[in-house]
Image (cartoon, grey):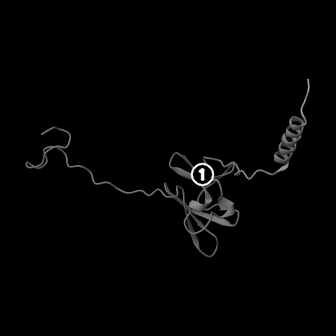
Amino acid sequence: MIQSPHSRVLAMAGVAVALLLNSLPLAAQEARDPTVEPAEGVSGGSLPKAVEGMSVLVRGDQSFLMVGTRLYAPGDTVGSLQVRRITETEVWLHDGKAQIKVPRFAGITRKTIAAKPACGVAPATLCQDTPP
């Protein structure tokens, strides 16, 4: 097999480019847990370090704050924060100076929708479910 000087130069250039690309650090994003809410979505700054990755567990009618593998009931302390109240949409913490309200789901608000009137309640109203 006869190689021309150009093919040898191209092969050496290819090896040099491959070595250069392997030695450069890649600027990839750090892998994120999709089950944990992003910290920048919380209003009023980021989450306190003691409750990053928190979730709520309900047993019977008692709610618990779950941080890592530990359960905290209202009145318990998580780091330097005391758990005051755990509701469906937020967790209330106290740091000794002020009360901190941490929403469980950033960007999601709960609102009540008015109930539709029952069919036949008023004689002039039509039911929404029946065709005219």
The quarter in which the C terminus is drawn is top left
| Quadrant in which residue 131 is drawn | top left
In the rendering, at what x and y percent does residue 109 appear?
44, 58
In the rendering, at what x and y percent does residue 83 appear?
60, 62
Against 94, residue 112 (above or below) is above
Q: Residue at x 57, y 71 (%)?
A: 99
Mark 1 surroundings: few (<14), some (14-19) or many (≥20) residues within 10 A: some
In the rendering, at what x and y percent does residue 38 appear?
60, 56
- Towards the viewer: 71 or 47: 47
Q: Across the whole image, how many numbered discs are drawn on residues?
A: 1
Q: Which residue is mark 1?
A: 55
- Towards the viewer: 127 or 68: 127
Q: Left of 131 or right of it: where is 50?
A: right
In the rendering, at what x and y percent does residue 98 appear?
59, 74
Q: Residue at x 19, y 43 (%)?
A: 128
| Quadrant in which residue 120 is drawn | top left
- Towards the viewer: 123 or 23: 23
- Towards the viewer: 123 or 75: 123
Q: Residue at x 83, y 45 (%)?
A: 17
Q: Secondary structure at mark 1?
A: strand
Identify residue type, mark 1: Ser
The quarter in which the N terminus is drawn is top right
Q: Left of 100 or right of it: where is 132?
A: left
Q: Residue furthest top?
A: 1
Q: Residue furthest bottom?
A: 97
